[in-house]
Each structure stands twice: as structure tokens, then as C-alpha cells.
Image: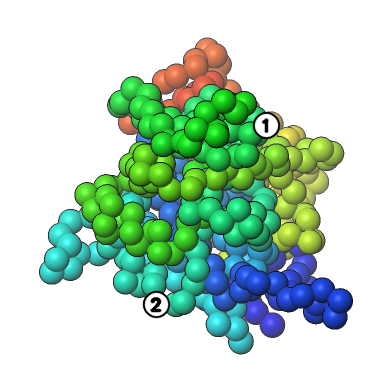
């Protein structure tokens, strides 16, 4: 049995082959099984500014989520649950935490099978100098590694989105339609996220136009060379999710022959493929999807986890578990606390306090009399004694231990890991500020949400 830990139960660690015996009356599938023919390429890096300051020292995929997880766990778990056992993670910016997590969490997941989760960090060679210039450039420079195994398709995935999807259905539709590229799109039109895009599709789900915007550039649009029989078809607009299934030979031709100077997959390769007449299809996804386009979106996704009913993303689904790093932590210790509609991670020490509608991450220490409402507490990497004594040289930073002090009030806030919150602190956004940069003081305000930085010190009696 794999050592990979599931939040549901140890029994969910077994990963079975979804290929069922064929009935003798029906022919065998003409397509090879997914576990042998598809490799996933997961990008752990997202927009550096989108979730700042949570991304100050980590990439988006490494941000803690729902007490026990990292954002990238949702995407890797989708692959595992979809029987995709060849997974490459391409990382670059602030990647130390993400690389560590991936290498520790998934090292034994495919034990006994021909599968792996392999981290490919940005590198320089004799011919390639400098960082990856974008997703397309990263794939081009790593193609020699990606092609080591004889797969038929590559599944390109952002590593910081939260959703559940059976990729096998996507792969089946792609193969049946004989597509060169299939783009996964949300059926719901939403505010367009820079880095994704808007698709115009005809009645047969062929993509005939792809529009995209960035933070620095206006909307750009590339139209396909559609044949005449599609020109009078009914068109629909749907939002790209930034997920692409692409044939292996098509990938190689696009990055090396057609667009050898292209750096970005969404901005350049996809519009380019449409413009040269490749068959680009859309696959509609109707489920919950959050692309973490802002601090507010990340906050709301965590708040969804505290719901007792109609949970939009279910971490407790035994048929589609979410995997993460195994940890040898004790059960949480709770002393006379009043807790409602909250999620408590492993190894917490919670004293006589009130917690409502809150995510409490691992190893969180909460003092007597504290009140925490509608917040995300990311927890700590260490345990620290509460009776730490300060000295003249160490100062106040040593006097306030990691965790949340006595009689502190926290409301609608995100407290990043290893923060030291003193006693009688009020983190309540008293003046109802919507945007505020107080990074020098250890916090910012984004969308009315107070975000305390990782490792920040908030002295006793502070009011934020």
C-alpha cells in the first residue's frame, strides 16, 4: 500500500485500474488505455501578483488550502483518480516549497506500477540560457524529457485551480472527435481571467475564435480558418479553463516547427494552431471550478469548505479523494472551545476560545479567550513553547510565540503560516478599508480581507 495520505481514510490509498473486462459481445476499444497513453504536464507557477502576498515566498500551487492541503493537490489528485499515472510538474518561480511538497507527497503513489510524479525545475544548459520564458518555452525546452515515454497525448494543466474532473471523459471525447487540440471550457461566462481566454465555438464545438487579455495588453483575438460549412452555424461564447489536451506529434510540431519563438501556450500556441487550420475542439465542463484569480476568490473557496451542505468542492468524497503529503502529527487538542461550521487541521492546540466558520491549519495554537470568525488560519511549520522568554538581544519577536494570543479577535482575515499574533489583538478591518498596503507592518488588505503575511509579527494590543 502506498504511504500517500488521504484526508478521507487510509483505505482510499488504493488506486485501481479503471479498465474493466470487456463483454465478449462488444469489441475491445480501439484506443490504448489512459494510464499508458497520456502524460500530464502540470504548471505549479501562476501569476506572481494574483495572490500576493501569499505568493511572496511560494508559488501558487504551494499555497495551503483547506487546513491540510496545498492547491496543487487538487490537480494531481484529479490525475490519479483519472488513471493518469505519468505526471510532470514544471516549476520555476518561488518553487522550493512546491518542489519539496511534490517530491515528498507523491514519491510512492504509483509503487508497483509504471507511473511517477516528476518535478522538472527550470534549468540552464549549453544551448538554453536563462529562465523559462513562458509555458510554451518550458515545454519546448523539456520536450526531450516529456517524450521519454511513448504517450499519445499531453494533458496541460494549471496547478493552482480547484475543481474535480474525470479527465478520462475529456480524453475519450478528444479521440472520438479526432481533434488535434481540445480546450476545456466552463459553460458559464465569467469575468475573463488574464492568462485564460474566451472561446467562440460553433454548433459542433469546434473553436473558431480564441480571445485573450493580459494585465498589460488589451484583448487580442485570433480567428480560425473555418471552412464554409461552419460559417453560418450558431456560435456560442464560453470561458477557457486553461486546460489543454494535445496530441504528442502536434505539440512537437507547434513548439519546434510552426512557432519556434513562441513563449506562451495560451497567448501564442493556441491562437497559432487555430490560425493554421488545426482542428481545435472545446470540451464543456459544468462542475465547480475556481481559478484563484484573486485573494477574494481564494478566501471564498476556503469558506466553501466550512459549509455543512451544498459544498461546492467536496474534500470528503471517497470516490474521488484528495491526496496530500503524509504527516506524523498528533490529533488536535481542544480544551473547552466553542467551535461551529469550521475545519480543524491536524496537530492543533486550541484552548478556551470561540471559532466560527473558519479554516484552522495544522499546528495552529490558539490562546484562551480568542474569537475567530470567517477566517483562514494557515497554521505553523513548528511547535513552539508558549513560555518563550525574551532577552535584550532577541526582543519582542521572541516574546510572542507562533500562533494566536489570548483574547485576540480575528474576523474575515487570512493569517499566513508561522505568523505571531500577540495578545488582545484586533484583526477586524475596523475602518472597512477595501485596499491597503501595510506590508511593512506585516499585513495588507485586499477586497476588504486582511491578509497577515507569512512569519509576520503583530504586537500585543494592535488593531488592524
Res 216 → quadrant: top left
**Percent coordinates x, y for residue 406 in the rendering:** 62, 38
- Residue farthest left in this picture: 126
Circle 1 packing at 10 Å, graded few (<14), some (14-19), many (20+), is many
CB contact under 8 Å: marks 1 and 2: no
Residue located beneath label 1 in the image: 374
Residue located beneath label 2 in the image: 148
> Does residue 10 appear left or right of residue 299 in this picture?
right
- Residue farthest top in this picture: 431
Write the residue at 33% across / 31% down.
440
Res 341 → quadrant: top right
Circle 2 packing at 10 Å, graded few (<14), some (14-19), many (20+), is few
| Of pointers 1 and 2, the one earlier in the residue sequence | 2
Res 396 → quadrant: top left
Residues at marks 1 and 2, CA–CA distance in whole angstroms: 47 Å
> Does residue 354 appear left or right of residue 195 in this picture?
right
- On-image quarter of the N terminus: bottom right
**Percent coordinates x, y for residue 250 in the rendering:** 40, 59
**Percent coordinates x, y for residue 451 in the rendering:** 49, 33
Amino acid at each position: 500500500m502506498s504511504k500517500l495520505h488521504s484526508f478521507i481514510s487510509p483505505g482510499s490509498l488504493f488506486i485501481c485500474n479503471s479498465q474493466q473486462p470487456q463483454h465478449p459481445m462488444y469489441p475491445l476499444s480501439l484506443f490504448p488505455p489512459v494510464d499508458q497513453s497520456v502524460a500530464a504536464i502540470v504548471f505549479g507557477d501562476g501569476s506572481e501578483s494574483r495572490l500576493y502576498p501569499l505568493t511572496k515566498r511560494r508559488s501558487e500551487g504551494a499555497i495551503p488550502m483547506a487546513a491540510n492541503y496545498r492547491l496543487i493537490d487538487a490537480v494531481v489528485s484529479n490525475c490519479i483518480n483519472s488513471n493518469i499515472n505519468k505526471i510532470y510538474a514544471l516549476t520555476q518561480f518561488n518553487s522550493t516549497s512546491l518542489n519539496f511538497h511534490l517530491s515528498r507527497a507523491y514519491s510512492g503513489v504509483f509503487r508497483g506500477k509504471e507511473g511517477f510524479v516528476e518535478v522538472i525545475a527550470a534549468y540552464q544548459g549549453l544551448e538554453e540560457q536563462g529562465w523559462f520564458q513562458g509555458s510554451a518555452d518550458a515545454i519546448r525546452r523539456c520536450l526531450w524529457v516529456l517524450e521519454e515515454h511513448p504517450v499519445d497525448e499531453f494533458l496541460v494543466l494549471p496547478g493552482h485551480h480547484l475543481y474535480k474532473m474525470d479527465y478520462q471523459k475529456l480524453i475519450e471525447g478528444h479521440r472520438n472527435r479526432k481533434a488535434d487540440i481540445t480546450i476545456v471550457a466552463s459553460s458559464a461566462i465569467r469575468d475573463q481571467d488574464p492568462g485564460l481566454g474566451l472561446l467562440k465555438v460553433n454548433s459542433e464545438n469546434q473553436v473558431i475564435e480564441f480571445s485573450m487579455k493580459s494585465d498589460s495588453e488589451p484583448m487580442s483575438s485570433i480567428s480560425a480558418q473555418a471552412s464554409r460549412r461552419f460559417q453560418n452555424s450558431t456560435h456560442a461564447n464560453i470561458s477557457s479553463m486553461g486546460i489543454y489536451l494535445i496530441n504528442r506529434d502536434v505539440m512537437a510540431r507547434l513548439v519546434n516547427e510552426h512557432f519556434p519563438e513562441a513563449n506562451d501556450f495560451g497567448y501564442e500556441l493556441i491562437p497559432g494552431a487555430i490560425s493554421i487550420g488545426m482542428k481545435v475542439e472545446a470540451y464543456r465542463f459544468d462542475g465547480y471550478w475556481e481559478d484563484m484569480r484573486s485573494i477574494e476568490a481564494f478566501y471564498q473557496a476556503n469558506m466553501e469548505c466550512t459549509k455543512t451542505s451544498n459544498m461546492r468542492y467536496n474534500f470528503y468524497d471517497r470516490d474521488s479523494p484528495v491526496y496530500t503529503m503524509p504527516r506524523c502529527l498528533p490529533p488536535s487538542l481542544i480544551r473547552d472551545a466553542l467551535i461551529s461550521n469550521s475545519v480543524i487541521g491536524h496537530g492543533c492546540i486550541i484552548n478556551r476560545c470561540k471559532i466560527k466558520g473558519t479554516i484552522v491549519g495544522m499546528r495552529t495554537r490558539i490562546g484562551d479567550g480568542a474569537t475567530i470568525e470567517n477566517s483562514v488560519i494557515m497554521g505553523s511549520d513548528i511547535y513552539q513553547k508558549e513560555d518563550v522568554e525574551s532577552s535584550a538581544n532577541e526582543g519582542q519577536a521572541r516574546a510572542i510565540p507562533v500562533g494566536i494570543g489570548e483574547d485576540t479577535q480575528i474576523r474575515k482575515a487570512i493569517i499566513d503560516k508561522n505568523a505571531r499574533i500577540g495578545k488582545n489583538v484586533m484583526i477586524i478591518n475596523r475602518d472597512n478599508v477595501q485596499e491597503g498596503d501595510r506590508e511593512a507592518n506585516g499585513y495588507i488588505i485586499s477586497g476588504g480581507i486582511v491578509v497577515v503575511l507569512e512569519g509576520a509579527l503583530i504586537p500585543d494590543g494592535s488593531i488592524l
